[in-house]
Amino acid sequence: MDETKPMILMEHVEKYYGDFHALKDINFSVRQGEIVVIAGPSGSGKSTLIRCINRLEEIDRGHIVVDGEDIYARKGNINRIRSRVGMVFQHFNLFPHLTILENVTIGQTKVKHAHKKEADARAQALLDKVGLGHKAHDYPNALSGGQKQRVAIARTLAMEPSVILFDEPTSALDPEMIGGVLEVMKSLANENYTIVVVTHEMGFAKEVSDRVVFMDEGEIIEEDDPETFFTNPSSDRAKLFLKEILTH
């Protein structure tokens, strides 16, 4: 990839749900290896924005380019696009009838047509990476919520994506389960992955992100480095948001 070009580029993106204007003239880019946190109140368009990046949502106007490819330019292979743009959801979406190892290998074998032996070896290595190698032959119902989310991260990594999107990855977890998931995410931040995270975990945003993007009512209101955003936000709306979220 040309290092001078962004890994993700959104230009004049508009998204409607009927009469509701969900995304309003979004212009946004992410560099290779950058960690960007998208923050904002509920209903501000954060999740819609990242779901458009892997075509879980279709845009109404504009362009989205990922790793040099305009993913809306023609009706390409959706599975190929999504294998390059990994996504970790709020809810883990593991297959309950498959073992943990099989949950991590299934995308490799079905989408990337990897040989089972190679897929198993990669899955085991990734489960070791997220601290769950010893659970490889268990089923999802034997795992805690935090462990399931770490499996979901391993499953995403198994597809060797160019970009990883996280949509509120800790919001469905009990407080004591959040730390393990955030630690795995922090480790990825040190490995040159390009990561976009929608989260209310402001501690993670402060510690790990390169940039914070603040959204409200379908618009990007401001974006800055974490220190500037948290100590001297430029908009009244961001000041109010931080006051609310940091005092609760």
Image: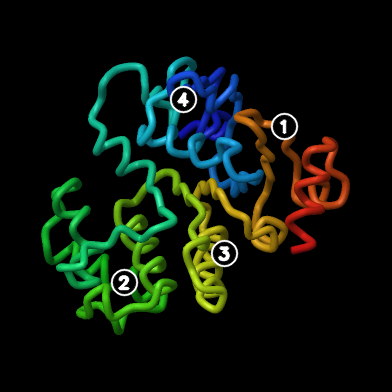
Q: Earlier in the sequence, mark 3 or mark 1?
A: 3
Question: Dot 3 corresponds to which residue?
Answer: 186
From where the camera sits, is residue 163 visible?
yes
Q: Real-space Cα distance between discs 1 and 2? A: 41 Å
- Residue furthest out toward the right: 232
Give the structural element (helix, strand or loop) at label 2: helix
Q: Position of residue 232 (x, y in %)?
A: 88, 46
Q: Earlier in the sequence, mark 1 or mark 2?
A: 2
Give the structural element (helix, strand or loop) at label 3: helix
Residue 80 sits above or below residue 87 on the image: above
In the foreground, 104 or 198: 198
Q: Real-space Cα distance between discs 3 and 1? A: 26 Å
Q: Position of residue 198 (x, y in %)?
A: 56, 48
Q: Amino acid at mark 3?
A: Lys
Give the side of residue 155 with respect to residue 38, left or right. Answer: left
Question: Dot 2 corresponds to which residue?
Answer: 125
Q: How many neighbours does mark 4 have within 10 angstroms: few (below 14), some (14-19), or many (20 or more)?
A: many
Q: Residue at x 25, y 77 (%)?
A: 136
Q: Real-space Cα distance between discs 4 and 1? A: 20 Å
Marks 2 and 4 close (CB-CB < 8 Å): no
Q: Earlier in the sequence, mark 2 or mark 4?
A: 4
Q: Amino acid at mark 4?
A: Ile
> Could you tell me how many numbered marks the image carries?
4
Q: Amino acid at mark 1?
A: Ile
Q: Real-space Cα distance between discs 3 and 4? A: 26 Å
Q: Residue at x 69, y 58 (%)?
A: 202
